[in-house]
Image (cartoon, helix red, strand yellow):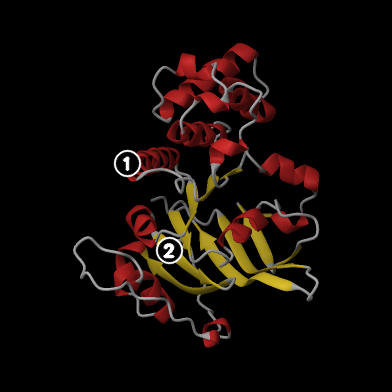
Amino acid sequence: MNDSGHLLDVKDLTVSFPSPRGEVCAVKNVSFSLGHEKIGIVGESGSGKSVTGRAILRLLPPYAHIHATAITFQEKDLLSFSEQEMRRIRGRQISMVMQDPKYSLNPVRTVGEQIREAYTIHRKVPRRQARQQTLEMLTAVRIRNPEQVYRLYPHEVSGGMGQRIMIAMMLIPEPSLLIADEPTSALDVTVQLQVLAILDDLVTQRGMGLIFISHDLELVASFCDRIIIMYGGRIMEVVDAANLHQSTHPYTRGLLNCLPRIDGDKGKLSTLQRDASWLDADFSATAGGK
């Protein structure tokens, strides 16, 4: 892991949405820093994981209220950027793989056209060069017969290949940071491992930072360097992935105890017991980059 400083600093991020019953706070006072490393953000559905990732890139709907003391990327204050300036950041410097990425592809355009466009938008190069770069990127994400896949439409590829294609599209502009929002959630275990291996290789080779959003604690623990545990829009704790099973926070312990194990007993799985006081606790330790 490269220790050359922080790529991203988020301080006191709060996101709320209007509702008939008043403002609903989806994320509250979230702070963390990311270096050239892999950070996992985990928690139950509705804990604020995806909203946090989208807020960084300002991809939330216009009625969302985003407040933060700072969101700094490579010493640039993203809060002060206009929408036009953010368009230059998205893709070129920070990319995001959405949930069920295959369904984010345009169904009426070939795979190759879409990946090539992601490259030419940020790099003014001849069409032939962009096509060659696209084929090399398809090879990098371990797709065999890239020439054939280049000409396919999204409905003609499998789920696992669709994930790889979307990862290729997000990585071809050579960003410094990738936000992956449950990119393997719809895949079987074997394909999950293949996709994670691809991400790991590409992140390591390019010296990128990665925010990996998931609800799968064990998966994140095996893949990331550090883990941010979220509940109710707040950070409960930050742990080194290698020390996850030594965590003493009751929420993290509850999540771990709910996981089925092949070598475990045959009794009923534990159920998560939540405590309202967790939402009032002040998590003051920032998840600093290593």
Residue 256 lies in what quarter of the image?
Answer: bottom left
Where residue 4 appears, as percent x and y from the top left, is 47, 52
Residue farthest toward the front in the current orientation of the protein: 267
- Report how many numbered discs are placed on residues in the image: 2
Above or below 273: residue 167 = above
Where residue 176 appears, as percent x and y from the top left, is 54, 43
User: Which structural element holds mark 2?
Assistant: strand
Where residue 136 appears, as percent x and y from the top left, is 47, 21
Q: Mark 1: which amino acid?
A: Thr
Name the residue located 42 percent from the left edge and 38 percent from the top edge.
202
Direction from residue 286 to residue 66 in the image, left or right: right
Direction from residue 235 to residue 93 in the image, left or right: right
Direction from residue 119 to residue 265 in the image, left or right: left
Q: Which mark is residue 227?
A: 2
Above or below 157: residue 43 = below
User: Which structural element holds mark 1?
Assistant: helix
Where does the C terminus fall, quadrant-wise? bottom left
Neighbour class for label 1 at 10 Å: few (<14), some, many (≥20)? Answer: few
Q: Mark 2: which amino acid?
A: Ile
Label 2 or label 1, whichever comes before in sequence order: 1
Name the residue located 61 percent from the left edge and 38 percent from the top edge.
104
Residue pointed to by mark 1: 190
Q: Nearer the viewer, residue 69 or 42?
A: 42
Name the residue located 80 percent from the left edge and 60 percent from the top edge.
63
Residue farthest toward the bottom in the current orientation of the protein: 277
Q: Nearer the viewer, residue 108 or 178?
A: 108
Neighbour class for label 2 at 10 Å: few (<14), some, many (≥20)? Answer: many
The alpha-carbon separation of the residues under discs 2 and 1 comes to: 23 Å
